[in-house]
Image (spheres, grey):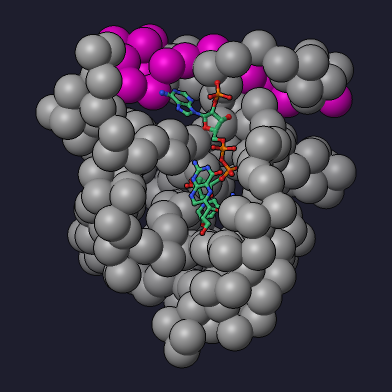
Amino acid sequence: MKQTILITGVGKRIGYALAKHFIAQDINVIGTFRTHYPSIDELLELGADLYQCDLCQPAEIDDMLNRIKAQHQGLDCIIHNASDWHNDKTSADITSADIMTRMMNIHVSAPYQINLALADMLTASAGESVGSSNIIHITDYVAEKGSQKHIAYAASKAALHNMTLSFAAKLAPAVKVNSIAPAMILFNEGDDEAYKAKALAKAILPKEAGNSEIIELVDYLLASQYVTGRSYAVDGGRQLK
Ligand SMILES: NC(=O)C1=CN([C@@H]2O[C@H](COP(=O)(O)OP(=O)(O)OC[C@H]3O[C@@H](n4cnc5c(N)ncnc54)[C@H](OP(=O)(O)O)[C@@H]3O)[C@@H](O)[C@H]2O)C=CC1
Ligand SMILES: Nc1nc2c(c(=O)[nH]1)N=C([C@H](O)[C@@H](O)CO)CN2
């Protein structure tokens, strides 16, 4: 039976690259998106089953989950990629409490709600085989290090990794649960040369790593039958700087 993978945040960058990668491997891709970019129409054309959902709204998540369970018999992997890299700057429109709530909603509450709702599907798909289903939480290097300008974001990513530990114990042996903790994977539009130089200098391998570093690590984790409850750093050796 064809494998089925659910990826959150497939509209752009890493999530979009992951969706394209698995579609090319003839794997059924279920994706969530918030903004309807042209990439969404492309993924639909390629056969992806996509759901528009604001992952900060539990009722929208519930509705999406009910539709996924009605539409799909099997589920082999969930990749929690969707994320909001919000700094701690407050304004008239957003308080510090709003920022923390938003970070915890997208990076902790949504993965928690989705994992609990779909755990039985992951376990059923694994059958008797050990570790053949997977959950991957994409965290961040700052989950272990903290961040002076993204305190709420870093705290929420640390909480996401803590859920890796809990869900790994809860869902073994059918389901492996691991974190991927990236650092400098992709710059953003508008990042100027000064910012780029400063960001690259934070690692002993000064590189913008690119999507392939994440994709190849995801493939490794899916193929493994023995790694679970761990975090895999993709950070150019930042901890040694
Ligand atoms: N890029 C990098 O260098 C690094 C990335 N990471 C992590 O890797 C993952 C992918 O990174 P990257 O591709 O750069 O992420 P982006 O910030 O470029 O994209 C995140 C995706 O999540 C979606 N999203 C954000 N908020 C919500 C929401 N409330 N509801 C639904 N969808 C939402 C966005 O949708 P929309 O377009 O509508 O906003 C977007 O598709 C993230 O978890 C990130 O934290 C970690 C360290 C470094
Ligand atoms: N959701 C996102 N999270 C993060 C992003 C991003 O673009 N979207 N970017 C980074 C930076 O690359 C940072 O790692 C540079 O040091 C972190 N998280």
Q: Is residue 56 covered in magenta?
A: yes
Instruction: Tell me residue 196's x, y (percent).
Output: 65, 57
Span highlighted in magenta in the image: 46-63
Q: In the image, 67: left or right of 220?
A: left
Q: In the image, 32: left or right of 23?
A: left
Q: Quadrant of residue 33?
A: top right
Which quarter of the rendering shows the N terminus? top right
Q: How many marks?
A: 0
Instruction: Tell me residue 53's x, y (percent).
Output: 47, 15
Query: Which residue is at a point 67% across and 46% down the rendered structure image?
Result: 192
Q: Is residue 213 visible?
A: no
Q: Quick one: 240 or 135, which is closer to the camera?
A: 240
Q: In the image, 91: left or right of 192?
A: left
Instruction: Tell me residue 27's x, y (percent).
Output: 75, 42
Q: Quick one: 40 or 171, which is closer to the camera?
A: 40
Instruction: Tell me residue 93's x, y (percent).
Output: 27, 12
Residue lying farthest to the left in this orientation: 97
Q: Quadrant of residue 85?
A: top left
Q: Quick one: 131 or 227, which is closer to the camera?
A: 227
Query: Which residue is at a point 43% across and 82% down the rendered structure image?
Result: 239
Q: Is residue 77 visible?
A: yes
Q: Is residue 15 covered in magenta?
A: no
Residue lying farthest to the front in this orientation: 194
Query: Which residue is at a point 42% across and 66% down the rendered structure image?
Result: 141
Residue lying farthest to the bottom in this orientation: 240
Where 40 sits versus 16, above or below?
Answer: above
